[in-house]
Image: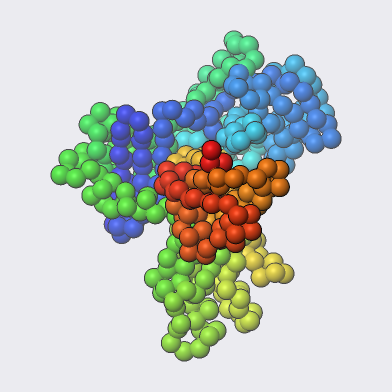
């Protein structure tokens, strides 16, 4: 049983894909966030970096977009313009990656317009077939069909949903996209630089377009207005699927009724338990994500190598799921438990490749490095779950760590020594600390020696609301 569930609230829209009651995909969209991936702009070249084969483009947003000039061997527009790009030049660009931190959004002149069955590429001459269509005969049929309906001088990618479809459906799809491109081109001629020419579909429409196929048994929506919008869109796109769309009116809220809210709560956790008793540890850095596999309580039934191999196989399945759910992109390094058997290593890699085949984001299982780490790369364009839902901790300021109570206590004693060397506090000191620091000082009699050494009274007061690393030292008057 495959279901799509859409929950709509004024502040946020959430869409989920469930397979046999297990959460496979979850996406969020908030009105407070300006999503620009997929948008097409009339950009104005601000400056060119010849040594990097790149340029910065004014698209009318707060940050200029970064444009790499060598992004695709089939991309005729970039190849023709590579030596001609100059400051002040205006050209259509599409955003392929959100701005992040100090970095602006990433843009390309390799425009792609996705439809239901095809993706039109007006600036490329190329025919591609979805890698998820594996039948050689079907791939050949669709490739020949694409050649017949492809507009001259353009490119076309045939999507997974086109499998088994006839020429007429694909032709209608291409015709719509071609009309859309003509409209974008006309707007390009009319407007100045730094202007939005085309806004990509919102989460709801993207989810329908990309995921609502014949394989989906049920499409549930918990908002009446959105339900009507979905039905109107389905009538045009795939009318045969309309009976599968239903308005959810249950006693509990939709995501709560299907256990999705509970899964979302666990998606930000650093440790992910495995059924065997092992667990994963997921750590994010600016450059990459690192995943560590641990056996935990799992001891196996036969021998050590059997335990290790089975834990790694189970971990691989959970890793593929977590990468997909959390939408982790970029470089991912996985530290599986060491295996001596080369056949087991190769089997693990093949297992990972098979598990990531269905991921809509291009995922590449590179290899096992000389240090025994499995390297994975995954395409990323939009803000992922962690970036959307979480912000840096105001206590640790994003480090993920705070100083221990012992460290803070030692710093306090060092500060008092420094103060005593300058001026003796005849009536002693009063220290205010977090309760954990106060407990450590009390349990280890840390200030008794200091009190004796300088012949001073040191009183300790604790406050639960204090920052764990903060403290105050007052001389008693």
Residue 112: which quarter of the image?
top right
Q: How is the image coloured?
A: rainbow
Q: Residue at x 60, y 29 (%)?
A: 94
Taking the image as drawn, is residue 284 in sight?
no
Of residue 257 and residue 206, the one placed in the foreground of this image is: 257
Residue at x 76%, y 32% (from the top left corner): 54
Left or right of residue 139, residue 73 in this image: right
Quadrant in the picture for residue 369: bottom right
Tell me if residue 78 comes above or below residue 405 in the rendering.
Answer: above
Count of marks, rendered view: 0
Q: Nearer the viewer, residue 382 or 195?
A: 382
In this rendering, position of residue 196 left or right of residue 423:
left
Q: Where does residue 266 sit, x and y in percent of width and height? A: 39, 54
Question: Residue drawn 72% across and 35% down?
Answer: 68
For the view shown, which residue lies furthest in the left direction? 251
**Quarter that holds the N terminus:** bottom left
Residue 433 or residue 368, whichever sits in front:
433
């Amino acid at each position: 049983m495959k279901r799509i569930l859409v929950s709509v609230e004024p502040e946020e829209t959430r869409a989920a894909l469930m397979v046999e009651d297990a959460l496979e995909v979850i996406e969020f969209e908030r009105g407070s966030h300006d999503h620009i991936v997929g948008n097409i702009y009339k950009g104005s070249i601000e400056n060119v970096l010849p040594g990097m084969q790149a340029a910065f483009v004014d698209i009318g947003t707060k940050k200029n977009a970064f444009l790499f000039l060598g992004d695709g061997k089939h991309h005729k527009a970039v190849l023709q313009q590579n030596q001609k790009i100059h400051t002040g030049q205006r050209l259509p660009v599409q955003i392929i990656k959100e701005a992040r931190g100090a970095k602006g959004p990433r843009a390309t002149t390799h425009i792609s317009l996705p439809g239901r069955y095809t993706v039109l590429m007006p600036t490329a001459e190329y025919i591609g077939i979805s890698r998820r269509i594996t039948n050689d005969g079907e791939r050949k049929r669709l490739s020949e069909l694409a050649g017949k309906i492809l507009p001259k001088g353009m490119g076309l990618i045939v999507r997974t949903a086109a499998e088994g479809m006839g020429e007429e459906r694909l032709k209608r799809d291409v015709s719509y996209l071609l009309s859309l491109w003509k409209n974008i081109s006309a707007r390009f001629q009319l407007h100045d630089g730094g202007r939005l020419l085309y806004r990509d579909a919102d989460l709801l429409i993207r989810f329908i377009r990309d995921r609502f196929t014949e394989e989906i048994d049920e499409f549930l929506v918990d908002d009446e207005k959105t339900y009507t919008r979905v039905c109107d869109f389905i009538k045009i796109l795939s009318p045969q699927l309309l009976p599968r769309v239903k308005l959810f009116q249950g006693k509990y809220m939709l995501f709560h009724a299907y256990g999705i809210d509970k899964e979302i709560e666990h998606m930000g956790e650093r440790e992910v338990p495995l059924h065997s008793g092992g667990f994963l540890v997921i750590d994010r850095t600016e450059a990459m994500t690192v995943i560590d596999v641990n056996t935990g309580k799992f001891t196996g039934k036969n021998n050590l190598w059997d335990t290790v191999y089975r834990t790694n196989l189970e971990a691989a399945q959970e890793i593929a799921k977590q990468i997909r759910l959390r939408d982790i992109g970029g470089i991912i390094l996985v530290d599986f438990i060491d295996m001596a058997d080369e056949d087991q290593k190769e089997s693990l890699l093949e297992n990972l490749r098979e598990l990531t085949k269905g991921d809509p984001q291009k995922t590449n299982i590179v290899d096992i490095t000389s240090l025994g780490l499995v390297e994975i790369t995954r395409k990323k364009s939009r803000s992922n779950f962690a970036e959307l839902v979480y912000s840096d901790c105001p206590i640790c300021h994003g480090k993920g760590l705070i100083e221990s109570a012992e460290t803070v206590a030692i710093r306090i004693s060092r500060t008092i020594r420094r103060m005593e060397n300058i001026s003796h506090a005849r009536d002693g000191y009063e220290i205010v600390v977090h309760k954990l620091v106060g407990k450590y000082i009390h349990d280890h009699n840390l200030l008794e020696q200091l009190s004796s050494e300088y012949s001073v009274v040191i009183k300790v007061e604790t406050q639960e609301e204090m920052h764990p690393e903060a403290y105050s030292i007052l001389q008693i008057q």
